[in-house]
Amino acid sequence: MAMAAVAGGLVFQFRDARWLSDPVLGPSPAVRTPQPVPLVIDNGSFQARAGWACPDPEVPGEPLLRFRSLAARSRGARGGAGAETQGCVDHPVVLTEAVCNPLYSRQMMSELLFECYQVPKVSYGVDSMYSFHHNRRQEWPCNSLIVASGYQCTHILPVLEGRLDAKNCKRINLGGCQAAVYLQRLLQLKYPGHFAAITLSRMEEILHEHSYIAEDYIEELQKWRSPEYYENNVHKMQLPFSSKLLGSTLTSEEKQERRQQQLRRLQELNARRREEKLQLDQERLDRLLYVQELLEDGQMDQFHKALVELNMDSAEELQSYIHKLSLAIEQTKQKILQAEVSIEVDVVDSKPETLDLDPLGSEQSLEDVESIHEFEPLFAEDQPEVEKPVTTVEPVFNLAEYHQLFLGTERIRVPEILFQPSLIGEEQAGIAETMQYVLDRYPKEQQALLVQNVFLTGGNTMYPGLKARIQKELLEMRPFQSSFQVHLASNPILDAWYGARDWALEYVNHEEGWITRKDYEEKGGEYLKEHCASNVYVPIRLPKQAPRTTEALAPTKVLAASVGNPCDLA
């Protein structure tokens, strides 16, 4: 991020990174010989990462594809994109999932992988467990208390002898998403004139690069009350602006002409868009009318096949869509005609006006001006010579400073919601209280083992000062003179993918942790094979219904016999 030092603090420029299309990557021959290597996908809530688990040094040992995680539903014709090899993906897949992932969610994912992409086998694991396995691999198996904070939520996970203790895991519904929304609300209230410029993407950039967690929140707020401390630590975020707003030398006629040019360009652009829309709608209507002709000709097989391609269910839905599309086409044609008429009217009304000038009057005015200039030397001799001071015209205000966001206590106030959710009105416990609650569920001996390896991972744990704050909270909650250790992941964002890759390389030729297509067909999509970084599999247990005895059925028969035929009562 570009920054500039000025009087009274630092000014930082927003990067405003633009969305780029995902690259199309051709697989290296090394990922298919001697056998297809696993495809590792870290399906995070903020960002998804994908790459190969290949021992060949020619293949990069890092994610080749990283993109924002978005959930969307297509409208109209069905379509999609994915990695395919002649209609299938013949690579084993290692996929991360949430802690205590619902069986239904895993079932839908397994169904997609096995039925749509025809994968040979798949393995599911918890992202934070993979990260922990990657960082503490030399000490495995070990005990730990994992604090994993991501974009949507924060988890406190106890690990006993290298396995997740799922029944004592706790979740806090706070993460980077809630922090970004909170910061956006604060700055929009502080700067209502820049309401539209304070976007969520810019708030995420501020959180990632300008926020930090105070070791003592109240004490840090007292520091910010000092004007000197404020001036030395405030961060100024420069919003984009145009210097042309400072002033304009255009005359009123030039401004009017410019406005007319802009209006003509807008009219031409709108006319072009309407024509393009009309053409697309007409093509769609022709397609629908063709399908309707299939129905009228009695070609039912081709008609039903065409309905499936159009993602429609019945002929009534087809007829309704044809009617709506026809109305839309007629409305577009009317708008095009009205626009053409308005343009013609504007051209007729924009003829230049001619003014009748009096030549005698103009000559008289010139003579008057010349006569005035004849007396100027007489008055100039009588006046003493005075040096005229050079005056500089200062602008009314600094436009660049007007477009700056001053980040003061917001730098610590927003990340503090992880420890004090009440700041945003959430009735939840913070990280410290949840850690204490989880530890209290174990005997003192196990508590001492867990706090010896407190592990922080996830993109939302990258705030400066978080490790020191966790240490302070543990010091307050643990007994006097007890020991504990807090470790931060080497790369909180990518260690989950690295850990999944390490596991795939180690267990690719083992049966442990892999769900084959045979397992999927026999045991269902929710089935999970456990391993060192996986969830705990809890199968669905449906209660058996007790068989109905003749004694239980007898009163029903008696009641039916007593009621008799309803028609007899009439």
Image (cartoon, rainbow, N blue to C red):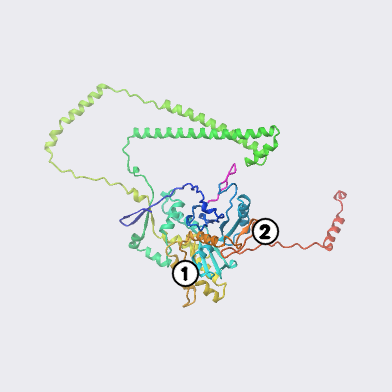
Magenta: main secondary structure equals: loop
Q: How many marks?
A: 2
For residue 65, above or below residue 378: below
The residue carrying pointer 1 sits among few (fewer than 14), some (14 to 19) or many (20 or more) residues within 10 Å by Cα, namely some
Q: Earlier in the sequence, mark 2 or mark 1?
A: 1
Percent x, y for residue 254? 34, 33
Real-space Cα separation, disc 2 to disc 1, in angstroms: 41 Å
Q: Is 361 placed above or below 134 here?
A: above
- Residue wearing tag 2: 523
List the single residue furthest toward the front.
34
State whether residue 154 appears in this view. Answer: no
Q: Are marks 2 and 1 in contact (CB under 8 Å)?
A: no
Amino acid type shown at disc 2: Lys
In the rendered image, residue 458, in percent from the top left (x then y), is placed at 49, 61
- Report the magenta residues as a range: 70-80
| In this picture, residue 518 sits left or right of residue 550 | left
Q: Which residue is mark 1?
A: 486
Given the image, on which type of amino acid does mark 1 rest? Val
Disc 2 element? helix
Can the viewer see residue 148 in this picture?
yes
Residue at the (67%, 59%) spot, across then down: 523
Is 154 in the magenta? no
74 inside magenta stretch: yes
Residue at 49% of width from left, 74% of height from top? 478
**What is the x, y in percent for residue 195?**
44, 49
- Identify which residue, 455 or 276, lies in the foreground: 455
**In the rendered view, would you say 254 is above or below 169?**
above
